């Protein structure tokens, strides 16, 4: 690959994508599969796709070099799709999964790092009932193993899994971005769900991997209208991209042409539909904006930060909008920090203080500020270029007095840094719901000068930490609202050594002791903070052992969420996931809360042996597969005969006395389907013919007794 092509590879850039030195917003369209296979030439379609403003296409199979060559000629990036037997129980049919691994490696080697290939979706919407049947954690780990294999074969590509609301909890830990297929026809509901998905995605970019509307049932103009607002909202809500479904009304699925819906931007004869014009008019490259950008005062407090402050200030200087002042508060440094700032950053307003602590230093910076909004960050942070522009949008309508965003760790350079990034104890935001925050870390905190003055600023008794927690609680006590802007991130360098990280945790424990004395109502008897909201630790929200998943009655909820007791922490990058790092992370996972607990209240608590609250059937289940009926039909028949639905978190669908049944559907190539049944309990369990006491089976149908 030429050097220029290599530099133009798409990569992640915090919550967004980057190509070379430019931030890139993905605007993609799905392409194929078509009745009769690929067209004789891709040229006419790809020319029209590029002319409409798309910069990427998504396939549901892996591309060949002919397709990639044509895409490259038109400036299109391609996201391939691994096509495999994911709609069947691939643990019971291991050949399906083995073939997926073989096909993935073969396809990646055949493309030989083609510059037009940007990434691969290793799966697409594994059905919720089948995931529940196989086990969410096992399925997630299988997806993660495919991503690991793909990345080892083609390290330059982006890898993801195309999820959907029915399995929110299935987010792979090691994907490069979070991708969700979302079909919501109401703009308010769509916007609200995007806010939720940002929290599920954690640190990484959020992509809408499918969105569209059937013009057959809704009309051509309605399709165009919906795509218009979907593109606008996805940009406003700071997604990294959106994929329109689909290019053509012609569609091939499960061995036959689909003729009863029309999601295409072009009709079956290849003619443009009004929806294509709506796409063409949309500019995905428009920068985030508000009607008026307020004047900001960026305040950076430092003590002995000479070695790290330069990167912070260089990033601050490059930010947009450019209407802001920068104040550096030197809190009694003895390493020449103040002289360094004065010599190299003449545009900065410098305050030299005797040592006074972080809370007092931040107050001094606020007192010297002339801006309407105070923007606080730390000397070990590098704000994104669009940090202020993105928080401006949330301040625009006056709802929020304070706004913050994620603080993301840069890519670790050593296994020790990787452990620190994945360990508990990092600054985290706390969300009451998907929009309002309970806490925003001081390294990424913007607040109106009016609200700051109204509550008296930071409490100077907090010298190293805890000042931001106290500040946010007092803001909320004064009826101010705190908002969250997912795209307004800062890069936050963690401590490079475990020893320094643990010293930092001791400091946090000392700050918590002060917080307990000032806000006892926010802490339990054991000294743990009692947050109203949920603490987000940067990792994607996903099912783990002990998670509680709300599947809905009989597993039919359209949106199936997960509740975890522990923070959704970041995982170890594959490059550093060796035995030493894993052991160190396990030790840190115990030692961090233990250290903080001891410093805070002279107590140590351990949650290793807590089990989950999910009811689990006793005994070994009997499993069988039947054909000739559907899952829905069987559930209806069971209920008609007195079977009672299980609860929303139960791992079974229906029960009668001590017998419980779970059902799932698996689908094979050509559309052939089986209904799987898992049966627990019942009299005569040891009898291998027991299922016939519940169900009468023959080769074609299931008859209930």
Image (spheres, rainbow, N blue to C red):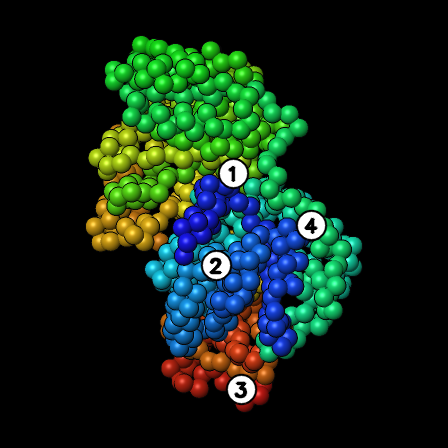
Badge 4: how crowded within 10 Å, few (<14), some, or many (20+)? some
77 or 644, which lies in front? 77
- Side of 128 relative to 44 (left or right): left
Which label's residue is closer to the chain start, 2 or 4?
A: 2
Kind of element beneath mark 3: strand
Residue at x 29%, y 26% (from the top left corner)? 307
Measure how far apart labels 2 and 3 are at the Cα level: 49 Å
Q: Dividing the image into 4 quarters, which one contains the C terminus?
A: bottom right
Q: Above or below — where is 578 with respect to 451?
A: below
Q: Earlier in the sequence, mark 4 or mark 1?
A: 4
Quote the CA–CA distance across marks 2 and 1: 26 Å
Mark nearest the camera among 1 and 3 is 1
* Badge 4 element: helix
- Label 2 and label 4: CA atoms lie apart by 23 Å
Q: Which residue is mark 3?
A: 697
- Mark 2 residue element: strand
Judging by the rendered image, the residue that carries numbered circle 2 is 117
Q: Which residue is mark 1?
A: 487
Q: Is residue 75 above or below residue 104?
A: above
Mark 2: few, some, or many residues within 10 Å (few <14, many ≥20)? many
Kindly identify which residue carries mark 4: 280
User: Disc 2 vs disc 4: Cβ atoms closer than 8 Å?
Assistant: no
The reply to whether discs 4 and 1 touch (Cβ–Cβ < 8 Å) is no
Name the residue rendered at 64%, 58% in the picture. 47
Question: Going from the N terminus, do you reach mark 2 or mark 1 first?
Answer: 2
Query: How far apart are the two marked residues, 1 and 3, measured between alpha carbons?
Result: 55 Å
């Amino acid at each position: 690959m030429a050097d220029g092509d290599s530099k133009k590879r798409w990569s992640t850039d915090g919550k967004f994508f980057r190509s070379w030195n430019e931030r890139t917003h993905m605007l993609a369209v799905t392409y194929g599969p078509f009745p009769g296979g690929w067209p004789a030439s891709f040229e006419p379609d790809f020319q029209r796709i590029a002319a409409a403003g798309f910069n990427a296409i998504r396939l549901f199979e892996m591309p060949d070099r002919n397709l990639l060559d044509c895409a490259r000629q038109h400036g299109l990036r391609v996201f391939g799709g691994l096509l495999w037997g994911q709609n069947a129980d691939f643990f019971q049919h291991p050949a399906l999964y083995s073939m997926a691994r073989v096909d993935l490696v073969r396809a990646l080697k055949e493309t030989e790092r083609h510059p037009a290939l940007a990434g691969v979706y290793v799966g697409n919407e594994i059905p919720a009932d089948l995931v529940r049947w196989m086990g969410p954690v096992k399925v997630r780990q299988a997806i993660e193993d495919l991503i690991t294999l793909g990345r080892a074969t083609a390290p330059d590509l982006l890898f993801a899994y195309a999820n959907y609301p029915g399995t929110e909890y299935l987010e792979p830990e090691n994907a490069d971005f979070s991708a969700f297929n979302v079909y919501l026809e109401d703009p308010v509901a769509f916007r609200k769900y995007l806010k939720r998905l940002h929290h599920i995605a954690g640190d990484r970019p959020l992509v809408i991997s499918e969105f569209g509307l059937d013009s057959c049932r809704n009309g051509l103009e309605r399709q165009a209208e919906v795509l218009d607002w979907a593109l606008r909202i996805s940009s406003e809500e700071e997604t990294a991209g959106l994929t329109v479904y689909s290019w053509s009304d012609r569609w091939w699925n499960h061995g036959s042409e689909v003729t009863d819906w029309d999601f295409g931007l072009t009709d079956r004869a290849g003619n443009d539909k009004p929806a294509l014009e709506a796409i063409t008019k949309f500019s995905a490259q428009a920068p985030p904006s508000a009607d008026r950008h307020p004047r900001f005062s960026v305040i950076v407090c430092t003590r002995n930060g000479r070695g790290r402050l330069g990167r912070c200030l260089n990033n601050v200087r490059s930010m947009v909008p450019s209407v802001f002042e920068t104040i550096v508060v030197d809190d009694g440094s003895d390493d020449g920090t103040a002289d360094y700032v004065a010599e190299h950053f003449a545009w900065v307003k410098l305050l030299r203080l005797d040592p006074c602590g972080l809370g007092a230093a931040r107050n001094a910076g606020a007192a010297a500020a002339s801006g309407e909004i105070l923007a606080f960050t730390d000397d070990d942070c590098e704000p994104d270029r669009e940090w202020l522009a993105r928080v401006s949008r949330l301040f625009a309508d006056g709802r929020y007095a304070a706004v913050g965003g994620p603080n993301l760790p840069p890519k670790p350079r050593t296994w020790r840094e990787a452990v620190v990034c994945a360990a508990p104890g990092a600054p985290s935001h706390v969300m009451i719901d998907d929009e309002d925050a309970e806490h925003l870390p001081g390294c990424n905190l913007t607040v109106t000068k009016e609200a700051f003055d109204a509550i008296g600023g930071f409490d100077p008794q907090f010298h190293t930490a805890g000042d931001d927690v106290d500040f946010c609680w007092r803001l909320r006590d004064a009826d101010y609202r705190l908002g969250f802007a997912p795209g307004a991130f800062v890069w936050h360098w963690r401590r490079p050594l475990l020893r320094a990280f643990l010293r930092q945790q001791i400091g946090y424990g000392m700050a918590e002791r002060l917080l307990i004395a000032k806000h006892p109502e926010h802490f339990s008897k054991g000294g743990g903070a009692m947050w109203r909201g949920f603490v987000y630790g940067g990792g994607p929200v996903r099912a783990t052992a002990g998670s509680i998943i709300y599947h809905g009655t009989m597993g039919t909820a359209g949106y199936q969420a997960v509740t975890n007791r522990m923070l959704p922490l970041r995982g170890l990058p594959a490059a550093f996931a060796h035995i030493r790092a894993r052991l160190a992370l396990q030790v840190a996972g115990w030692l961090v809360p233990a250290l903080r607990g001891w410093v805070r209240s002279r107590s140590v608590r351990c949650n290793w042996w807590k089990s989950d609250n999910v009811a689990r059937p006793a005994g070994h289940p009997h499993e069988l597969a039947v054909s000739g009926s559907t899952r829905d039909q069987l559930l209806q028949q069971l209920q008609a005969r007195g079977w009672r639905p299980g609860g929303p978190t139960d791992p079974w669908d229906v029960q009668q006395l001590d017998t419980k049944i779970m059902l799932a559907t698996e689908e094979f190539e050509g559309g052939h389907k089986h209904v799987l049944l898992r049966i627990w309990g019942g009299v005569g369990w040891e009898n291998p013919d027991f299922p016939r006491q519940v169900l009468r089976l023959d080769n074609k149908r299931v008859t209930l007794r």
